[in-house]
Image (cartoon, rainbow, N blue to C red):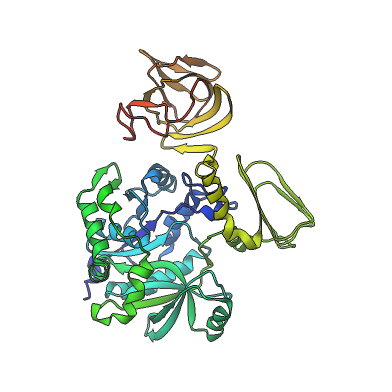
Amino acid sequence: MTAPLTTLHLLPVILCGGAGTRLWPMSRETYPKQFLRLGDQNLSMLQETVKRLDGLTQPIPKAQPLIVCNGEHRFLAAQQLQEAGVEGSQLVLEPVGRNTAPALTLAALAARPQAVLLAMPADHVIADAARLCAAVEAAWPLACDGAMITFGVVASRPETGYGYIEKGAGIRDHGAFAIQRFAEKPDLESAQSYIASGNYLWNSGLFMVRADQWLKAMAELQPAMLQACRAAMEHSSRDMDFIRPDADAFAACPADSIDYAIMEHLPSRPDLGIPACVVPLDAGWSDLGAWDALWDVLPHDARGNAHAGKTLAVDTYDSLLVSEACLIATLGVNNLVVVQTSDAILVADKRRTQDVKKVVAELKAQKRTLASAPRKVHRPWGWYDSIDGGERFQVKRIVVNPGARLSLQMHHHRAEHWVVVRGTAEVTNGEETFLLSENESTFIPLGHVHRLANPGKVPLEIVEVQSGGYLGEDDIVRFDDAYGRASPESTQLAR
C-alpha cells in the first residue's frame, strides 16, 4: 500500500464553491464570501487559503494548488491567484454544485497519480498558519502510507453548530489518533459532555489523502458518483488554465460531502485498507459560517465590539459593525450585527445570524437582484459600479485593468457616452480605432460595433452614460472576446 515517498508530492486542493448566503449582504452568488476581504484583511479568504502552506518546514514536495470552483467565478479565482503571486495553478470548473465529495473526485482525476491531496475549503479562517503547517507535516507520512486524515479542531466551547469526531487509539510518533466515530451536530447537553470528556474534536472539513486511495474509496463506496465524475473528466475541455468537465455528465452525479460519502464509512470498513485518522488542530480555526463567527475572530474593543471600516459605537456592547463605505454609528444597543454595503444594510440580532439566509430566500422570492449580485460587478477585465439610473438612462463607473480589453460588441437598444477620468483608452467605434486621454470623450450610437481597451500601465477609469429603451446587461452581442465568453449570435448576462 505504501508508495515511495520520493515519488509523492503534496497537492493543495482549494474547494472554492458555495454561495455564503449567511454573510449577505457582503457575500452574493456572483461574488461569494471566499473572494471577500473580510474585516480589515489585505487578502481575500481564497488568497489566505493558498498562502497557508508557505510556512511548511519539512522538505515536502509541494505542487501549485488546484482550484475547484463554480464556472461563473473562474475569472475571479484566476485574478485573485495572480494577485497573490500564484502561477501555474489549474482551475477545475464545476458546471453545477454537487458538494465536496464530487469536487475532490474531479481534483483526484485531474491530479497526477503521485499526488497527496490536501482538501481545504476556501472560506475558512485559520489564524495560526504555522500550526496548520505543523499538523500537515504530522499527517504527511500517514497519508503517504495510504491513510485518510482529517484535521480535528481542538474544541474551545460546547458548540452545537459543528459535527464532532471521537478519538480512538493514539498513533505512535505522529500525534494522530484513529477515528472511533463521527457525531452529528449535537444538542447542548451532548456537546457539553463531549467537551468534558476531552475525547472529541470539531470536524473542520480539512482532509488529506492520496489520490489513488481516494479513488479506491470512491469505487467501493460511491461507484455512481465516481462513474459520473470520470465521464465528466473524460469529456472535459481545456482553455487557458481552465478544465471544464462535461456539464451533462457532471449534472448526473449524486451530491454529497466528503464526510458522508467516504470518511464516516472508513472506521467500519477496515477491509478497504484505508485507515481513518484524525490529527488535532489548534490554530484559531473558524468556518466563518455566519456574522457571529466573524465577530468571534476579529479583535474586540473594551465593550466587546468588533469593527471593520468606518464605525462609531457609543454605549454599544458585544456587537459587530462592518462598513464598506459610509459611517455606521450605533447608540445604546447590544448584541447587534450591522453590515453596510454600497446597496444594502443588514441589522440583525447577533444570536440570529444563522437565519440571514432567510433574508436571502425572501429577496429571491420577491425576485430582487440584491440576493445574487452586488452593485459593484467584477469582470475578467476589471469591474463596473452602477452609480445611478432611472427611466431610459444608467450611469456606470468602469475600471479596466492594464492591458485588458472588453469584448468587441454591439447593443440593439442603447447608446453609450464614454468620458475618460483616468488613464488612456483605446476605443473602437464602428470603423474607427483611436485613443482617448483624460477628460476626453466619445459617443457610441445604438447599433455601432465597439470595444474599450486599456493599452496603458495604470488602470483605466471611465464614466459611461447609457441611454435607450432597454438597459439590461443581456443586450450584448459579442463578435470577439479574449475570455471565450460568447459566440457572435448569443447574448449574455454579463458585459
Image coordinates of residue 363 in percent, x first then y, are: 55, 46
Q: Residue furthest front?
A: 365
Q: Quadrant of the C terminus?
A: top left
Q: Quadrant of the N terminus?
A: bottom left
Image coordinates of residue 118 in percent, x first then y, are: 36, 64
Is residue 134 placed above or below 42 in the rendered structure? below
Residue 304 vs residue 374, the one in the foreground: 374
The residue depicted at 36 percent of the width and 77 percent of the height is: 277
Residue 43 vs residue 327, the one in the foreground: 327
Is residue 19 placed above or below 412 in the rendered structure? below
Q: Residue furthest top?
A: 431
Is residue 29 placed above or below 348 in the rendered structure? above
The residue depicted at 38 percent of the width and 74 percent of the height is: 138
Q: Residue furthest left?
A: 234
The residue depicted at 49 percent of the width and 15 percent of the height is: 442
Number of disc labels? 0
Image coordinates of residue 241 in percent, x first then y, are: 30, 45
Query: Is residue 323 at least partly visible in the picture?
Result: no
The residue depicted at 40 percent of the width and 31 percent of the height is: 404
* Image quadrant where residue 480 sits: top left
* Image quadrant where residue 267 sits: bottom left
Image coordinates of residue 184 in percent, x first then y, are: 46, 74
Query: Is residue 181 at least partly visible in the picture?
Result: yes
Residue 446 vs residue 485, the one in the foreground: 446
Looking at the image, residue 386 sits to the left or right of residue 141; the answer is: right
